[in-house]
Amino acid sequence: MWTEKLQVQGPYNFDLVLERLSLDPLQVVDFTNRTVKVPLYIEKEPIVLQVQAMGNIDEPSFIIKGQSEVYKSKAIERLKKVFHWHQPLEGISRHFRESDLREIFEEHRGTAIVLDFDYYSCLVKCIIHQQLNLSFAHTLTERFVKTFGFQMEGAWFYPTPETTAQLQIEQLRAIQFSGRKAEYVIGLSEQIIQGHLNLDIMEKLSDQEVMDTLIKIRGIGRWTAENFLLFGLGRPNLFPKADIGIQNALKILYGLPQKPTQEEMESYSVKWAPYLSYASLYLWRSIEKRSEKK
């Protein structure tokens, strides 16, 4: 087993990161010890790392633990991007201090965008979550992973594209997938294993190129592609205007009688660029906290 300590420039509130991760029942979060287990694929090999927070918001540090030294350096580099340790949050926070989002950014100061742990699981999760309330979406995803995926060192891995492509629609309907959603997940997996979709090259493409590639796939529309850009690739300037959560958050923020129009959302968001992804995250976070307080 190896251990590595990393210093990160503050502000960085890992406790708020853990709160958001804990909304997903598949995440292995320990609030007492401030840890999370992270299942990763490095060169197609599954590995599990434990991330433990030390220090505080302004002087954060992390202890990383893993089993095998073979993929240590590549695993740490992946973690830096997953948890947004590669870019200080102070500059992003400063950008919003004179904006309409200043109070939300102050309340959730140091909350980072945390990426899904691999591209494939991000896309599958987005497809499963389409047009479902968050609670049942998490339940359905958990059933999918625990039925067809595998567990290692206490962490859950999504089934691989090879495994999912071999499933029958009836197997997914048995865990309450709709027939169409089952077709979409299986079809995506087939596209990958047949070589028609290469997720590994997505990082090199522009936002528009990623969007154009993904929406050609049955079951993937703009909402799913935008979420992949944000939570899969970590692109900084995404604002999914069709997202109901963002619409509801803006309705509350501005005291609107109804959800904002696309034109109103465009007007509100002009000054938030080039960090629209962070505006999106903090708006989502604002309504998550309201729900928790009820």
Image: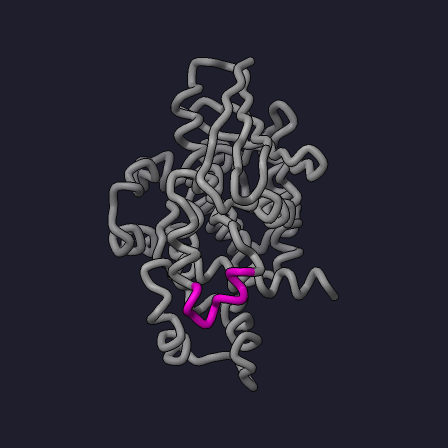
Magenta residue check for 101:
yes
Q: Nearer the viewer, residue 124 or 270?
A: 270
Report x, y in % for residue 239. Answer: 40, 63
Q: Is residue 228 above or below residue 242?
A: above
Report x, y in % for residue 129. Answer: 55, 55
Q: Quadrant of the C terminus?
A: bottom right
Q: Is residue 235 above or below residue 154?
A: below
Q: Locate residue 219: give its quadrant.
A: bottom left
Report x, y in % for residue 137. Answer: 61, 54
Left or right: where 138 falls relative to 278: right
Q: How many marks?
A: 0
Q: Residue furthest bottom?
A: 257
Q: Nearer the viewer, residue 4 or 130?
A: 4
Whether residue 165 is visible, yes or no, is: yes
Magenta segment: 97-106
Left or right: where 62 falls relative to 42: right
Q: Nearer the viewer, residue 210 or 241?
A: 241
The residue at 69%/39% (across/down) is 31
The residue at 55%/44% (across/down) is 57
Colouring convention used in this rendered image of the protein: one colour
The residue at 40%/80% (across/down) is 264
Q: Quadrant of the N terminus?
A: top right
Q: Is residue 260 above or below residue 127?
A: below
Q: Residue furthest front?
A: 58
Report x, y in % for residue 69. Answer: 46, 13
Q: Is residue 153 above or below residue 235?
A: above
Q: Residue furthest right?
A: 294
Left or right: where 25 falls relative to 105: right
Magenta residue check for 67:
no
Whether residue 120 is visible, yes or no, is: no
